[in-house]
Amino acid sequence: MPKPIIEVDSPLREGDRRILVCQNTSCAAKQSAEILAKFQDEPLPSNCHAYPVGCQGQCSVAPTVRIVPDETWYCRLTPEDTSAICDALREDTVVEEKLNPRIHRYSHY
Ligand code: FES
């Protein structure tokens, strides 16, 4: 059962990271529920938690995941991409080939 949708701007404890997985129409049509479930099942760093959220305004590159407070935006994810993103969170890096090029101009696309 997914956790309830949260407000993106709700208070974030210092040091915490949120993995915001869009569950709105465009993303839902492209396996965002499976992506959320994978993030929630992964052994994430203790300061990271995955949540379902509403539309993040990046529907054309769905499914979308945003990491806050880092402001790392991923796009066109598949459930198979979650492990690499979790590894990147542990290592304080990013998965460059999955960065949203509309937001991260240097990303590979
Ligand atoms: S539906 Fe997911 S970003 Fe808009």
Image: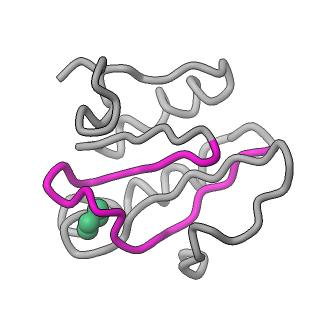
Percent across and percent down for residue 11 are: 76, 67
**Quarter of the figure that contains the C terminus:** top left
Residue 11 in the figure: left or right of residue 29: right
The total number of labels drawn is: 0
Q: Residue at x 54, y 45 (%)?
A: 67
Colour mode of the rendering: one colour
Residue 92 in the figure: left or right of residue 104: right
Q: Nearer the viewer, residue 93 or 41?
A: 93
Q: Is residue 20 above or below residue 17?
A: below
Residue numbers of the magenta segment: 47-69
**Quarter of the figure that contains the N terminus:** bottom right
Q: Residue at x 34, y 70 (%)?
A: 55
Percent across and percent down for residue 58 are: 25, 56
Q: Residue at x 69, y 71 (%)?
A: 10
Residue most extreme to the left: 60
| Residue 61: in magenta span | yes
Q: Is residue 81 above or below residue 33?
A: above
Q: Is residue 3 above or below residue 62?
A: below
Percent across and percent down for residue 52 are: 50, 69
Residue 49 quadrant: bottom right
Percent across and percent down for residue 77 are: 29, 43
Q: Residue at x 60, y 38 (%)?
A: 70
Q: Quadrant of ligand 1?
A: bottom left
| Residue 100: in magenta span | no
